[in-house]
Image (spheres, rainbow, N blue to C red):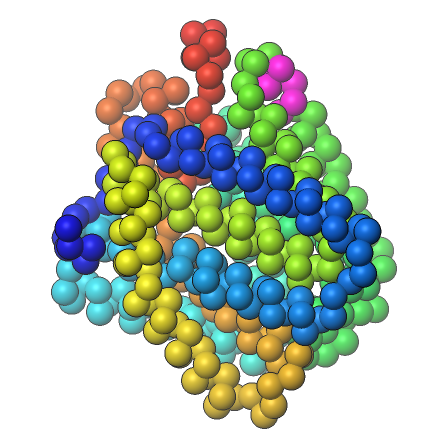
Amino acid sequence: MNPFGPARLITPSPSWADQYERRHRLLFVAIAFIAAIAGFVSTTPGRSTQLAILAIGVVFIALPHGAIDPWVALDRGGRRGLDLVRFVARYLVLAGGVIGLWSVAPVAMLVAFLGFSAWHFGEGELDRDRAGPLGKTVETMSRGATPILAPILLRPDETFALFDMLAGRPLSELAHAPLVGSLCTLWAVSRFVSIVGRARAGLADRDAGTFEMLLEEAAVWALFATLPVLLAFGLYFCLDHSIRHALRIARRLAPDSAAKGLRLYLLRAAPVTLATLLLGAGVGALVLERWDTTALVKVVFVGLAALTLPHVLLGVPPASDDEGVAGVAGSRSTMRSKRASYSGSRVPNQRSHQRK
């Protein structure tokens, strides 16, 4: 098997990845609650230790989930050669633009990064089969904002101290500003309404997947309530978001074989992961006067911001990819199962299908 051959990504029907993703969700929930308990009963590690743990997770788990982007984008259209050069050029231009704008307008870019990340997280965790574009947008932003607004609500001083580092100017006085409090309150209300609605729907359909999603959200809340922000975010971003994305890419690479799909994912992500690490280290060496904790926090998060924009715009397949190859037009359950490859939707159980 040639891992770098021209095999195209396939939009699969539910397969091994459904079971793997469910196991991954339950494993993440278990790890999150164990970590939350440990954070509650033990002393808080120093910021350098927190940053080291975050950096390890980013390098070995988070970076590969973005490094696979060229394969996702190019295999989707069956393109090679010059198209790869164009893709990489667009990717680098977008990433470089984010870094350049961050040096000019860091506060604006920080706000944009947080908002864009919330949308991306929400798109990855929720189904796209919701009623109307307004409901889709509100629910996507509400759910995706949990790992961003939960730390502001639960640990405002610590969170804004990190924002100070990223913006290069004091933002800590905003931690208790009325506007920030109102935003967090509005978001908390939206989460309450969403959770109640999903719980009622899960009871009506007897869908265990719905309750697993709610349990997962509770685990994220537990992380940010008991752990330092860097650790909590690192566990969520690496162990939840990034691994979920990796499983869905592996599923598309090899719908019928978990071993083959995961092997292809690792082999294809490795070159760009290594190149990104070398490029990031080179840029950091050129622009940083000293490598202290503040500088490393900025390198990690500005680097994530620079990669998030092209990752979402160029690397993540749009919903139309799934819709264009759906086997049975007009079948809600069929479309939902295919969208689940990237959307985070759980295929309802058989009783739910029959009721519909």
The magenta segment is 198-203
Location of residue 175 with respect to 134 vertically, above or below: below
Location of residue 278 with respect to 63 vertically, above or below: below
- Residue 191 image point, x, y percent: 69, 36
Q: Residue at x 43, y 47 (%)?
A: 245
Farthest residue to the top: give it: 355
Queried whether the magenta region covers residue 199, the answer comes back as: yes
Q: Residue at x 15, y 50 (%)?
A: 1
Residue 59, visible in the rendered structure: yes
Give the total number of marks visible in the rendering: 0
Q: Nearer the viewer, residue 219 or 40?
A: 40
Lateral position of residue 356 relative to residue 84, left or right? right
Location of residue 178 with respect to 304 vertically, above or below: above
- Residue 151 image point, x, y percent: 73, 54
The majority secondary structure of the magenta stretch comes to: helix
Quadrant where the C terminus is found in the figure: top left
Question: Toward which corner of the image does residue 117 lie, by quadrant?
Answer: bottom right
Q: Nearer the viewer, residue 195 or 190?
A: 195
Lateral position of residue 198 relative to residue 2, left or right? right
Queried whether the magenta region covers residue 116, the answer comes back as: no
- Residue 160 image point, x, y percent: 75, 66
